[in-house]
Image (cartoon, rainbow, N blue to C red):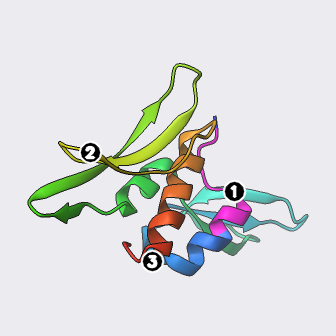
Amino acid sequence: MKSYTDLEQSKVLAEILPLESADMYWFRDDIEIPKIYPKDMMKDSVSVTLACWSLAALLEVLPMITKDKDTANPFIAKTSDNEYYVFYATLTQEVDSSGIYDNPVDACYEMIIKLHELNLL
């Protein structure tokens, strides 16, 4: 299962999220193979290339939405076909959905992009 944002997703998120919200970083070593390390781990002969977000970090940046005393809380759901989606739901209605993806990281990434486009981040 995918555990972190890939390089392309990380590039997009680095433009819209605070870099402090990332919990991992993509690094390139001397032979230019990308590797992921925790952000607090410094290695000799390794240079930082890009912030990277785990599923837990992505969930932390999803905002709580409150409207008319009805709070929308984001959560991940898994379908019977082992696919994932993120949506905001209130007590009375579904507010928004990320779409269906084969892993929860992609579902969270898409929800963050959608919320950014709606100026809700």
3D distance between C-alphas at marks 3 and 2: 30 Å
**Residue 118: x %, y % from top left:** 44, 73
For image coordinates 52% across by 19% down, the residue present is 80
Residue linked to disc 3? 18
Q: Are marks 1 and 2 in contact (CB under 8 Å)?
A: no
On the rendered structure, is 104 left or right of 87?
Answer: right
Q: First in sequence: mark 1 or mark 2?
A: 1
- What is the secondary structure assignment of the residue under circle 1? loop
Q: Is label 1 or label 2 in front?
A: 2
**Residue that numbered label 2 is attached to:** 93
Q: For the magenta stretch, what is the residue range?
A: 2-10
Q: Horizontal and vertical percent for residue 95?
A: 33, 53
Q: Is residue 12 above or below residue 2?
A: below
How far is the residue under mark 1 from the one under mark 2?
32 Å
The earlier-in-sequence mark between 3 and 1 is 1
* Category of crowding for the residue at label 1, using alpha-carbon neighbours closer than 10 angstroms: few (below 14), some (14–19), many (at least 20): some
- Specify the amino acid type for callout 2: Gln
Q: Which kind of residue does numbered mark 3 sit on?
A: Pro
Quadrant of the image for the C terminus?
A: bottom left
For label 3, the SS is loop
Q: Amino acid at mark 1?
A: Asp
